[in-house]
Structure formats: C-alpha cells, structure tokens
Image (cartoon, rainbow, N blue to C red):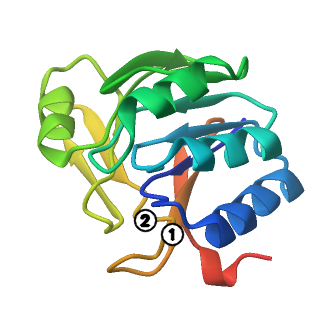
Amino acid sequence: MQIAIFSDVHDNLVNLDKFLQWCKNIKVDQLIFCGDLTSAQTLQYLAERWKDPLFLVWGNACQQDQVKTAADKVKNFTHFGWQASFIIGDKRVGVVHFPDLAEKMAESGEFDFVFYGHTHKPWQKKKAEAMLLNPGTLAGLYSKATFALWDTATNNFTLKLVEKIQ
C-alpha cells in the first residue's frame, strides 16, 4: 500500500491540488495529515477531490471547531482531534502536529512510526524503537513544499518535492 503523509497546508490550494493529482496518478491508497489545513474551506476543497481514506489531526493554525465539524461530514475522513493512534498492517502509528508531543509518543514505546508537522522542515530520525517523521510543509512556507510517501510493503519513506512532481 502507498500512503502519502503531509502537513501544514495553510490554505495553499495550488500545492494541495498538485499533491492530490500526483497521489491519484500514482494510485496512493490513503493520506495521513499532520495538521494545519487552516480553514474548513480547505478541508471542503480536499474532500471534493479525495475520495479514499484520510486520517487527520488538528494543528495550531486552524479553525478547530469548523474543521472538525466539516471533517465529521466526510465519510472517508477520520478526524482524531489533537493526536491519533491507529494500526496500518502490523505497524502502530501515531500522528500529532507538535514535535515535542511526537517525541513523547515515540519514547512511550507504543508506536512503530510517529508522524508530525509544525516545523515546516522535513525530518526523519529513530527515537527509542519508533521512527519519527516530519513530511515538511505542503504550503512551502519557510521551506520548499514537501510531503512523504510511505510504501507499507517495504516500510520505506521517500521525501517528495512538490516542484518536482508531475
């Protein structure tokens, strides 16, 4: 299975559209979002263009109640609030927006992978037994626009630059 992990859209619909089109073209099965869509309108835009599963958490720059209300209306979206915990295949996955909380989740020993956002900088490191991964910022704020692709068959992660995808 191919899963795209992204964060920090900050209402950049141009990059969101490029990302979603690329995901459809390579047949990504699912999306994991690490926070900061920003508005309910961006969530609605995403819902109109993505019909497969999407797991998402809040970030610090979002209209939380409006985004949650909008997400709850989309049957293929699962909104976890501030942090998520779920299983994909045999891997225990945690998702949160903030790096300090991601570190604590990784140190807990409860997860194989912990995905987070907020810093806008892609990062990957091993912490305790968990792999911590930040896919960067899809918006391209303070860093180039990036996201990550997870091949669950091999557990390999690839960082993708939005400017290089077709």
- Tell me which amino acid carries mark 2: Thr
Which residue is at a point 37% across and 23% down the rendered structure image?
81
Mark 2 and mark 1 lie on one chain; the one further toward the N terminus is 2
Dot 1 alpha-carbon crowd within 10 angstroms: few under 14, some 14 to 19, many 20 or more: many
Q: Is residue 23 left or right of residue 60?
A: right
Quadrant in the picture for the N terminus: top right
Q: Which residue is mark 2?
A: 137
Q: Is residue 165 above or below residue 77?
A: below
**Can residue 150 be seen by looking at this rendering?**
no
Is label 2 in a helix, a strand or a loop? loop
**Can residue 74 be seen by looking at this rendering?**
yes
Q: Is residue 88 above or below residue 28?
A: above
Give the image location of residue 106, x and y in percent.
Answer: 20, 32
Give the image location of residue 50, x and y in percent.
Answer: 78, 41
Say which of 51 and 130 sits in front.
Answer: 51
Q: Is residue 154 left or right of residue 23?
A: left
Q: Is residue 145 left or right of residue 114?
A: right
* Whole-number angstrom distance, CA of label 2 to CA of label 1: 6 Å
Residue 146 is tagged as 1
Say which of 132 and 62 sits in front.
Answer: 62
- Tell me which amino acid carries mark 1: Thr
Give the image location of residue 35, x and y in percent.
Answer: 40, 44
Which residue is at a point 37% across and 45% down the rendered structure image?
62
Dot 2 alpha-carbon crowd within 10 angstroms: few under 14, some 14 to 19, many 20 or more: many
Residue 76 is tagged as none
Q: Are marks 2 and 1 in contact (CB under 8 Å)?
A: yes
